Amino acid sequence: MNTYTVCFFGHREIYNLFELEEKLEEHIRILLESKEYVEFLVGRNGEFDQLVSSTVRRVKRNYRDDNSALVLVLPYLSAEYEKNEEAFQEYYDEVEICQSSSVAHFKAAMQVRNREMVDRADLVLCYIERKSGGAYQTVLYAKKQNKQIINLAGGMTTFCE
């Protein structure tokens, strides 16, 4: 089976929620319709990550749920996860603890995890409106790795492509 892997990165705060949600839904639906199997790699560190996870779940439920997995990739084992492991396992199809970031310094763990997600991905879907922050740094890394990048924010599409 051919697995097509998509990862998502974006700023923690979202200002055009409904427009972004529509764009996400369209891209996810197209991927589910056109690919044999899709692995959606997500984090859990802000509004964008939460929007992505809920949108993937909704599109899978409404269009097709037999050819994909929503995978939460945590940078390290957290107290929140340990306390709520059952809820996490019910919400996501899989939960992974990134091994390389789990042994990194905690301040670097998020970036290490993000780079590993990029390395696994065929496509990076992002929401980047400014040239700063961890999501921006991750997309710069993806660009250096010659990954296909789609920026769902209106203003910087040319930067990310």
Image: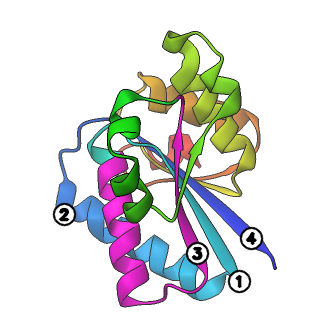
Query: Which mark sits nearer the N-terminus, 4 or 3?
Result: 4
Quarter where residue 83 is shown: top left
Q: Where is residue 26 in the image (x, y as percent from the top left)?
A: 41, 76
Residue range in magenta is 49-76
Question: Badge 1 local density, few (<14 within 10 Å), some, or many (20+)?
Answer: some
Q: Nearer the viewer, mark 1 or mark 3?
A: 3
Query: Which mark sits nearer the N-terminus, 1 or 2?
Result: 2
Q: Is mark 2 on a helix, strand or loop?
A: helix
Residue 35 or 145: which is nearer the viewer? 35
The answer for how far apart the CA atoms under marks 1 and 2 are is 28 Å
Residue 93 or 26: which is nearer the viewer? 93
- Residue at left offset 33%, top offset 56%: 87
Q: Mark 3 points at which residue?
A: 68
Q: Name the residue under label 2.
A: 18
The answer for how far apart the CA atoms under marks 4 and 1 are is 7 Å
Q: Mark 1 points at which residue?
A: 36
Query: Which mark sits nearer the N-terminus, 2 or 4?
Result: 4
Residue 94 or 137: which is nearer the viewer? 94
Q: Name the residue under label 4.
A: 3
Q: Is mark 4 on a helix, strand or loop?
A: strand
Instruction: Please identify the quadrant where the N terminus is shown.
Output: bottom right
